[in-house]
Amino acid sequence: PTLRIDVVSIFPEYLTPLRAALLGRAIDRGIISVDVHDLRDWTHDVHRGVDDSPYGGGPGMVMKPEVWGPCLDDVCPDDALLVVPTPAGVPFTQSMAEDLSRERHLVFACGRYEGIDQRVVDDAATRTRVLEVSIGDFVLIGGEVATIAMVEATVRLIDGVLGNAASHQQDSFSDGLLEGPSYTRPEVWRGLAVPAVLRSGDHAKIEKWRHEESLQRTRSRRPDLLPADEPGQPD
Ligand code: 6GU
């Protein structure tokens, strides 16, 4: 495959969407491989315990280094990129998805949100590249859903995965602005008409209109994305 993906989780069944729809088709066609591993396969005790209370006190549990360490020794070779989803990570962006889509081997280590013992990450970083990444300013129960989001954003950029290779050149964020609205038939639906310009056949005018719609939408929803010389910049 062009890209090999391994995912470690205590809820491997939570990652079954990775085998559905377009991603499943990319796996079937040999463009990518996805292997999901159950972290509990690396436990030794009869209770198959993966976490313990935090040093220093506080709520929640922390995932044990003696389980994660040997797991990553087996699953994450030195030349892979280890991605650790955490709300305390650096923000995941379209440009990071582009970087990940050029890798040969990604390993996602899904922990619960209270986290994995930091020494697991620090130890792995002595031999392999590690990214601690967040998908947004909210807290999930664990890294599984974040992994699905990052894998989908990454894999759709690989040649041959999407039907139309040109379609991701027009994505929101590829030019730094949000995409404007889209329309299809019928021309009038529930009394609402498609903007006349889109039926004009004037492609220069259509392109200009779409750019204005993108700017307007970005100004109202995501002013933080506007270039410094655009009106509507946040203070
Ligand atoms: Cl990557 N993981 C978890 N557990 N929560 C998150 C997140 C990641 N990104 C935002 N919230």
Image (cartoon, rainbow, N blue to C red):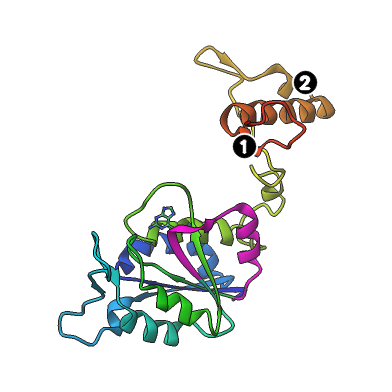
Distance of label 2 from label 1 (alpha carbons): 33 Å
Q: Residue at x 44, y 62 (%)?
A: 85
- Relative horizontal placement of residue 173, taking residue 109 as reference (left or right): right
- Based on the picture, tell me whether residue 65 belongs to the magenta stretch: no
- Based on the picture, tell me whether residue 85 belongs to the magenta stretch: yes
What kind of element bears circle 1? helix
The quadrant the N terminus occupies is: bottom right
- Quadrant field for ligand 1: bottom left
Amino acid type at circle 2 is: Ser
Residue range corresponding to the magenta coloring? 83-104
Where is residue 206 shown, x and y percent of the image? 77, 27
Would you name the residue on which mark 2 appears? Answer: 200
Q: Residue at x 37, y 50 (%)?
A: 139
* Quadrant in which residue 173 is drawn: top right
For the residue pair 109 and 41, the one nearer the viewer reads as 109
What kind of element bears circle 2? loop
Residue 138 against residue 150 in the figure, above or below: above
Amino acid type at circle 1 is: Asp
Residue 133 against residue 104 in the figure, above or below: above
